């Protein structure tokens, strides 16, 4: 599907360490079907670059200054449904992987896997499939999924906080620079996860949990 | 301010010295004064008595002389009759008359003495009483003290008599008072004075003792207060040391993870690029390169392990709940003890320092359970209601003696308690032979709005 345009997969590299970027770029230069559109050092600029470049795949580190890769993934997949995010991290615990999946990532590869595997993972997620490093897959199987629906994502929690502070969906949409419909979708998700129907209860819930001040 | 024990002792010694000196001076002065008084009083009382005696004898003498010369035979009888009834002081006061041969002429209280001579009558000291009285009378009247039968008591008492001589009758006439009354009165006075001295002694003693008591009480209170403040300071200092240490750990962990490991990873990809270059040139991959790649992999894992041990980054990236889930599943894998984690739907609510504290509590608890509890199931439950975040760690192990651990080697536990208290929270442990429950409570006020501050306002 992607190859329709150029036969090449466009890639945005997000990693706060230039030497890692350099090493990867050196490896990817041996593959003809990957084109690196740009690089970025943190979550915030990754967001801007992603919206500007609209890459097919983003190779996303997790631990980064300003905004971590998981939170960035959530916002990017929310705004660019055609862009796939492949998490590329040293963190191998199940919680990171689950959070990444919850945030909308299509795959998760560890930084100690070979560049060859990274290449195949990029190809897989670009096709709309998922890819997980073998040790990651093993971890997921060993820690059988409690449905990750049991916690709110960072984005959802931000919206809950704004709702509880009395902002309307329209105001929240403006505040976060997203569509009104997206906000409403988030609100529905929040309500179903918290099992709460009305606004008053949402506000009380947020106060009781110390999310906002009374 | 602290008061050294030595200073307390010096104060106490000073109080004791003051008390002793005061007592010595006051009682001495008082005793001197009162002795003077007693003496003055004695002199006064005696002289009063003497005056009385002089007066009485003067009256009696003039009465007797008045009757002389009429009919000496019958007059003597009249005189005897007269003196029989001339009594005073409840009958202890009477007049006696002897002639120059010490023959008793009149003696109302001892009539059997009349008519006999008492020339050789001696008292216990060998003094010839009647002779002396006669002698005083011949000298123109004089006082004499001697022991004589007191009629009202029928016993010998000290008597002060005054005797005069009647030239007309050639008689010695006298009367006397018993001095035991006087001395009894003086004795009372002396007793009163002694009582007074005793009272003074008691008052000084009480004042001194209560002063000493208050000195100690004051010293104790001041030192206790100081000790408490010192302990608070130490606790605060300890907390600061822990904060600094945790911060340092976090920093080094991050340096390792985001610095060293990333460099190692970049080297890894450089090596891979090298091997791809070699294979492109249709050459076999050299063994040292394979070796290098393998070693690098080990190095990356090692550094990761160290970094994770110093400070798990998952705590910063995903929050406490996920960090706990992560060590819980690691723990289960390692020990085969089941760990169930119940956590709130919301996350990233806590600031770093509370996160770290609660994480260390879980870490320490799991270590303890693994070492001592022999447990099969562990439940870690985090819940938040209006005012408190509650974290409960419950196991079904054999338990331990909380008191004893607190007293002996519970440094880990005490350390955790202090860290929790630093966030205004509480940490309680209840243990029995069917398991242990550790409960940490942190007031919501300690973290309210943290998520907003970190995730919304920053933008």
Image (cartoon, coloured by chain):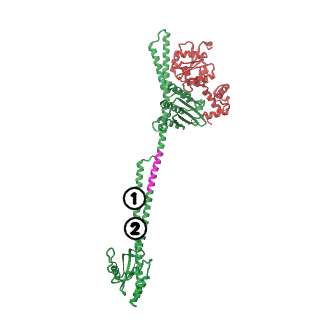
Of A203 and B207, the residue lying toward us: B207
| Label total for image | 2
User: Is B115 in the magenta?
Assistant: no
For residue B334, side relative to residue B153 (left or right): right
Chain in green, by letter, is: B
Horizontal and vertical percent for residue B200?
44, 61
User: Residue at label 2?
Assistant: B35
Quarter where residue A133 is shown = top right
- Which span is picked out in magenta? B207-226
Query: At numbered mark 1, what does the secondary structure look like: helix, strand or loop?
Result: helix
Q: Which residue is the extreme one toward the front?
A: B112
Q: Residue at x 55, y 15 (%)?
A: A119
Q: In x, y percent, where is residue B269?
A: 50, 17
Q: Main secondary structure of the magenta part?
A: helix
Q: Is residue B439 above or below residue A134?
A: below
Which of the two residues, B307 or B271, is positioned nearer the viewer here? Answer: B307
């Amino acid at each position: 599907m992607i190859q329709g345009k150029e036969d090449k997969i466009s890639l945005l590299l997000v990693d706060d360490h230039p030497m890692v970027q350099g090493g990867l770029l050196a490896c990817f230069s041996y593959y003809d079907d990957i084109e690196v559109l740009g690089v970025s050092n943190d979550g915030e600029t990754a967001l801007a670059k992603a919206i500007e470049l609209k890459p097919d795949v983003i190779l996303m580190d997790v631990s980064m200054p300003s905004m971590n890769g998981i939170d960035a993934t959530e916002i990017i997949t929310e705004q660019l449904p055609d862009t796939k995010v492949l998490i590329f991290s040293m963190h191998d615990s199940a919680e990171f992987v689950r959070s990444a999946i919850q945030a909308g990532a299509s795959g998760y590869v560890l930084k100690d896997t070979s560049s060859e595997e990274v290449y195949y993972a990029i190809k897989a997620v670009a096709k709309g499939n998922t890819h997980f490093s073998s040790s990651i897959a093993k971890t997921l199987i060993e820690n059988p999924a409690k449905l990750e629906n049991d916690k709110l994502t960072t984005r959802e929690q931000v919206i809950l906080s704004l709702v509880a502070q009395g902002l309307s969906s329209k105001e929240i949409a403006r505040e976060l620079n997203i569509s009104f419909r997206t906000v409403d979708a988030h609100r529905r998700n929040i309500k179903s996860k918290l099992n709460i129907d009305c606004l008053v209860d949402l506000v009380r819930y947020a106060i009781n949990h110390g999310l906002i001040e009374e | 301010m602290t008061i050294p024990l030595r200073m307390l002792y010096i104060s106490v010694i000073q109080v004791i010295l003051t008390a002793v000196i005061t007592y010595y001076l006051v009682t001495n002065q008082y005793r001197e004064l009162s002795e003077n008084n007693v003496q003055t009083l004695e002199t006064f009382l005696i002289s009063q008595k003497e005056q009385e005696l002089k007066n009485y004898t003067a009256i009696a003498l003039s009465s007797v002389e008045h009757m002389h010369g009429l009919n000496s035979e019958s007059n003597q009888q009249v005189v005897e009759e007269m003196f029989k009834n001339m009594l005073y002081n409840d009958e202890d006061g009477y007049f006696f008359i002897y002639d120059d041969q010490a023959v008793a002429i009149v003696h109302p209280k001892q009539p059997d003495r009349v008519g006999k001579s008492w020339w050789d009558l001696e008292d216990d000291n060998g003094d010839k009483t009647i002779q002396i009285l006669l002698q005083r009378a011949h000298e123109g009247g004089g006082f004499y003290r001697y022991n004589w039968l007191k009629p009202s008591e029928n016993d010998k008492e000290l008597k002060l008599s005054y005797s005069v001589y009647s030239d007309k009758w050639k008689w010695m006439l006298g009367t006397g008072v018993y001095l035991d009354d006087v001395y009894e009165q003086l004795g009372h006075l002396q007793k009163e004075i002694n009582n007074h001295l005793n009272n003074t002694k008691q008052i000084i003693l009480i004042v001194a003792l209560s002063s000493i008591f208050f000195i100690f009480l004051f010293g104790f209170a001041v030192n206790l207060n100081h000790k408490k403040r010192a302990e608070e300071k130490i606790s605060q200092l300890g907390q600061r040391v822990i904060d600094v240490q945790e911060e340092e750990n976090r920093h080094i962990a991050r340096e390792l993870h985001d610095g060293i490991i990333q460099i190692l990873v970049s080297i890894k990809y450089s090596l891979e690029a090298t091997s791809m270059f070699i294979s492109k040139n249709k050459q076999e991959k050299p063994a040292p390169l394979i070796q290098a790649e393998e070693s690098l992999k080990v190095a990356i894992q090692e550094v990761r392990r160290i970094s994770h041990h110093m400070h798990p980054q998952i705590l910063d990236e995903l929050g406490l709940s996920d960090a706990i889930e992560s060590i819980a599943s690691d723990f289960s894998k390692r020990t085969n003890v089941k760990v169930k984690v119940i956590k709130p739907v919301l996350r990233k609510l806590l600031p770093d320092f509370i996160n770290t504290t609660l994480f260390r509590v879980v870490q320490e608890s799991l270590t303890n359970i693994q070492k001592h509890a022999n447990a099969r199931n562990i439940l870690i439950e985090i819940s938040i209601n209006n005012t408190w975040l509650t974290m409960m760690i419950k196991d079904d192990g054999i338990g331990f003696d909380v008191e004893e651990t607190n007293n002996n080697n519970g440094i880990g536990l005490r350390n955790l308690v202090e860290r929790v208290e630093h966030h205004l929270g509480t940490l309680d442990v209840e243990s029995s032979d069917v398991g242990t429950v550790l409960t940490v409570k942190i007031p919501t006020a300690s973290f309210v709005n943290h998520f907003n501050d970190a995730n919304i306002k920053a933008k």
